[in-house]
């Protein structure tokens, strides 16, 4: 099985990626992709002029969209380019966020919950913790996000690395996986985690996915053009899928983003 679709791709606007959009596209074509989705970290509306240091600014949104529209037309006979965002679900700011991003074309959203509550609280989701309350808060917030019906899939859903009692791990992540099943939302095997040796993708999490029959997808989480199509990590992800009898959706249907 070869990788044909990657919907998890960043640009330099997030300030922690490198390479031009054209370089990503050329590498995706060379790697055999037929669809490449750009999903840079979305601009967000916060209080008191607060700006995040890991997402594009609101002023960059129009350039992001128009640049990709032009490249999509240029490469239309070689690859399908889609315009999206990776975004957190912050209930307090979510309506304003949707109002902001729908000013211009947006084809899809993927859920990447990097903070609990919101990033101004500094409660980062990617921690290693034995605190059950931290895990429970992460799961509850992401379940609420999935139930909005606006996200195409859930990126690195196992980001929060709970290392306490395995029964507690299973209890809360079974709830998250159950929500994903109810919402028909694929859960991503994240290839950045594979190639960097991060705590995710987590074996215990994807064993639960296999046991419960959750739908899985695979995303490159590309922050550099050379991994717009990451074949070596894809092979490892497929080995995990075989190991846990995972149902892999290689081309998730893009959900409409509407306000």
Image (tube, rainbow, N blue to C red):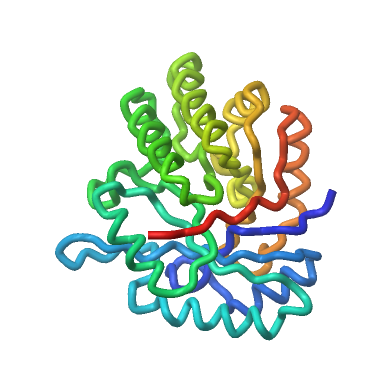
In the image, is 12 to the left or to the right of 88? right
Residue 175 x %, y %: 47, 25
Residue drawn at (77%, 55%), measured in percent from left and top? Answer: 3
Residue closer to the observer: 110 or 234: 110
Residue 100 x %, y %: 34, 68
Residue drawn at (44%, 28%), measured in percent from left and top? Answer: 162
Which residue sits furthest right? 1
**As displayed, is residue 113 above or below residue 229?**
above
Quick one: quadrant of the C terminus?
bottom left
In the image, is 203 to the left or to the right of 100? right
Residue 93 lies in quadrant: bottom left
Residue closer to the observer: 253 or 27: 253
Residue closer to the observer: 27 or 218: 218
Residue 104 x %, y %: 43, 74
Residue drawn at (51%, 40%), measured in percent from left and top? Answer: 157
**As displayed, is residue 175 above or below residue 233?**
above
**As displayed, is residue 155 above or below residue 182?**
below
Residue 45 x %, y %: 27, 63
In the image, is 214 to the left or to the right of 230? left
Residue drawn at (70%, 70%), measured in percent from left and top? Answer: 80
């Amino acid at each position: 099985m070869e990788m044909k679709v990657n919907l998890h791709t960043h640009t330099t606007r997030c300030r922690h990626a490198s390479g031009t959009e054209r370089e990503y596209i050329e590498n995706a074509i060379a790697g055999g992709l037929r669809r490449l989705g750009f999903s840079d970290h979305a601009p967000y509306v916060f209080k008191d002029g607060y700006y995040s240091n890991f997402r594009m600014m609101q002023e960059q949104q129009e350039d992001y969209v128009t640049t990709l529209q032009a490249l999509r037309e240029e490469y239309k006979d070689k690859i399908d380019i889609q315009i999206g965002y990776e975004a957190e679900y912050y209930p307090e700011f979510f309506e304003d966020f949707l109002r902001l991003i729908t000013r211009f074309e947006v084809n899809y959203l993927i859920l990447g919950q990097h903070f609990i509550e919101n990033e101004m609280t500094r409660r980062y989701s990617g921690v290693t913790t034995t605190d059950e309350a931290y895990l429970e808060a992460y799961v509850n917030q992401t379940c609420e996000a999935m139930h909005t019906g606006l996200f195409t899939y859930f990126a690195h859903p196992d980001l929060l690395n709970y290392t306490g009692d395995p029964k507690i791990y299973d209890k809360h992540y079974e709830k998250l996986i159950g929500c994903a099943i109810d919402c028909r939302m694929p859960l991503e095997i994240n290839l950045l985690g594979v190639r960097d040796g991060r705590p995710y993708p987590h074996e215990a999490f994807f064993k639960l996915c296999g046991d419960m029959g959750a739908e899985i997808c695979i995303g490159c989480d590309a922050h550099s053009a050379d991994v717009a199509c990451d074949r070596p990590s894809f092979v490892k992800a497929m080995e995990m899928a075989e190991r846990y009898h995972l149902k892999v959706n290689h081309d998730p249907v893009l959900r409409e983003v509407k306000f």
